[in-house]
Amino acid sequence: MKRLFIAFVICLSFGLTFAFAGAEGEVLYNKKCAKCHGSDGAKTSGASGGTMLKGQSNDDIKAKLKGYKDESYGGKKKKTMQRMVKKLDDKQIRQLSRYIGSL
């Protein structure tokens, strides 16, 4: 019974960790991305360079954000995106990409 309880507590703590990481990603998204890409990632206005985030995978978003940060990736809005991600650390990029990947 004690082992079952410990396993339950461990599972619960992982769930809370992932929920918190998702909340952090949402906060980052709303602060840095929503203005151009829309609240649900479906906006494709000129301000977003015609890029819709909704439907892209977590891995694709993470690779693109890292590429903008190290200046190895980018299109029409490259300079804008580089400015947006330059101060993000790896943890924030993971949180943000997880959130965007869930849109």
Image (spheres, grey):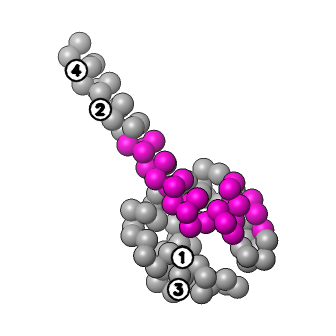
Query: What is the C-alpha distance between the residues marked 3 and 2?
Result: 39 Å
Q: Which mark is residue 3?
A: 4
For label 2, the residue is 10
For label 3, the residue is 72
At horizontal 32% and vertical 24% (from top left) the residue drawn is 8
Q: Quadrant of the N terminus?
A: top left
| Depth order, front residue of 50/5 | 50
Q: Considering only order in the chain, which callout, 4 or 2, is on the residue closer to the N terminus?
A: 4
At horizontal 39% and vertical 70% (from top left) the residue drawn is 89
Contact (Cβ within 8 Å) of mark 4 with mark 1: no
At horizontal 41% and vertical 36% (from top left) the residue drawn is 15
Contact (Cβ within 8 Å) of mark 4 with mark 3: no
At horizontal 39% and vertical 37% (from top left) the residue drawn is 16
As shown in the figure, which amino acid type bears the numbered disc 2? Answer: Ile
Callout 3: SS: loop
As shown in the figure, which amino acid type bears the numbered disc 1? Answer: Met
Q: Which residues are magenta?
A: 17-44
Query: What is the C-alpha distance between the residues marked 2 and 4?
Result: 11 Å
| Depth order, front residue of 91/32 | 32
For residue 77, which quarter of the picture? Answer: bottom right
Q: Considering only order in the chain, which callout, 1 or 3, is on the residue closer to the N terminus?
A: 3
Callout 4: SS: helix
**Residue 58 visible at all:** no
Query: What is the C-alpha distance between the residues marked 4 and 1?
Result: 46 Å
As shown in the figure, which amino acid type bears the numbered disc 3? Answer: Ser
Tell me the crowding category of disc 4: few under 14, some 14 to 19, or many 20 or more residues within 10 angstroms, Cα based: few
Q: Considering only order in the chain, which callout, 2 or 3, is on the residue closer to the N terminus?
A: 2
Query: What is the C-alpha distance between the residues marked 4 and 3?
Result: 49 Å
